[in-house]
Image: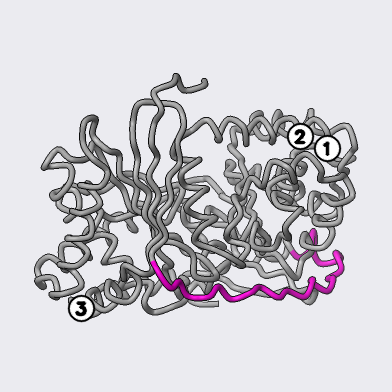
Amino acid sequence: MNSATLYAQLPNGLTVHLKEIHTAPLISHWIWYRVGSRDEQPGLTGLSHWVEHMQFKGTPLFPPTVLDKAISREGGTWNAFTYLDWTAYFETLPADKIDLALRLEADRMVNSEFKSEDVESERTVILSEREGSENEPLFRLGEAVQTAAFKVHPYRHEIVGEKQDLQSIRRDDLYGHYRRYYVPNNAVVTAAGDFDAQEMLARITELYGSIPANPLPEQSIPAEPPAAAETRLEVSGPGETAYIHIACKAPAASDRDFFSFTVLDSLLTGPAGLNMFGGGGVSNKTSRLYRALVERELAAGLSGGLQATLDPFLYDTTITVRNGQSPEQILSVYHDELHRLQDNPAPADEIQRAIKQARALFAYGSENITNQAFWLGYAEMFDRYAWFTGYIDHLASVTPQDVQRVAQTYLADSRLVTGVYVPDGSPEVE
């Protein structure tokens, strides 16, 4: 235990991380499982996301008709998320009602039913979700770029899964995935809010302590070979707007280069937030690519994205082509800006502004009780909580030379995957 948090591990391997915050009578409670699309095999993609859906289909103690009404009746909110490396569930409730969330998640770890009729109803829902995404130009382009960027690593698959897999996955595939990974030694329970940490730990121990640990599947995640040359691809489809999606391999979050890359992202496209609950935002209008592309009316907009992941994933730049402009001209300007950053260190004042903007966005995503509980577990999915507490200091230590080096290393032309969405003018499907 330190001055800010209580960190414990139960004999069955369950990690518990708690933070008292007595500013409001609220508690946000999360449970994180170290399983996501990274843990899926070809032919069974989308399992983790589908299992997440099934967790809302109830247990004998908490039937599905009870769950949502119970949380709403107590004035709470709840949700769940599946990502590349993890699946997470949360409830934020008035402090005196939090035991409902604690009992619910301990029960769902063991007793979710996976009824055949629920599996089939969710198959329809998830296939509809997948097909709806396929109508979105940016999803189609992003999926093509992601698949091209990874030849062997399971990060090549979309989290929702491949359509043919969603059509063939069976109930036993889902239930087996649940039983393999929803075990205490693969989970982190976090809570932040108005409680006594020792009392909360005692209650979590009472609810989870008797659940046995299980050996986790042995993993053999193949290392992705380095790219030998730039990859170019084209995707066509409905609509009237062209898009460009450029990706390169980015460092894992635990790599020290991640912080230098964060500053590069802020400098090049504007700061990108890591927290899905971030409140507020920071303008990207001072970024180099905004000034080079949007202000010159070549592009209608752009964004960059760097994700905190267990293994090296992707740094993405997405550009909306202004009607009448050429994607090739935009790509020429984009490469000019990259080469300018690679050839000459950015001025120190520009680096400091980029650091300040990235720091501000990080602060916006760390300020409320739900965000605090989020970070207690999220950082554990790819590193340790010290990654979160040391984030600002790591950013402050980044130099112009660090940014130049990561630009030269990760954004070399040979490491880029460039996709262009070419609209065919047909109406987009609603």
Reading the image, the residue beneath label 2 is: 122
Q: Quadrant of residue 417?
A: bottom left
Observer-nearest of 412 and 85? 412
Colouring: one colour
Q: Residue drawn 46% across and 48% down? A: 276
Distance, label 1 to label 3, CA atoms, is 52 Å
Distance, label 3 to label 2, CA atoms, is 49 Å
Residue 161 image position (x, y, % from top left): 66, 47
Amino acid type at circle 2 is Glu
Q: Residue drawn 64% across and 49% down? A: 89
Q: In which quarter of the image is residue 60?
A: top right
Residues tagged 3 and 2 counted as in contact (Cβ below 8 A): no
Residues tagged 1 and 3 counted as in contact (Cβ below 8 A): no
Residue 305 image position (x, y, % from top left): 38, 55
Reading the image, the residue beneath label 1 is: 119
Reading the image, the residue beneath label 3 is: 399
Q: Residue 318 carries which label?
A: none
Quarter of the N terminus within the rendering? bottom right
Amino acid type at circle 3 is Thr
Is there any visible trace of residue 87 in the rendered image?
yes
**Mark earlier in primary sequence (3, 2):** 2
* Secondary structure character of the magenta stretch overall: loop
Q: What stretch is highlighted in magenta?
A: 205-229
Q: Residue drawn 40% across and 69% down? A: 229
Callout 1: SS: helix
Q: Residues within 10 Å of mark 3 (few under 14, many from 20)?
A: some
Residues tagged 1 and 2 counted as in contact (Cβ below 8 A): yes
Residue 331 image position (x, y, % from top left): 25, 52
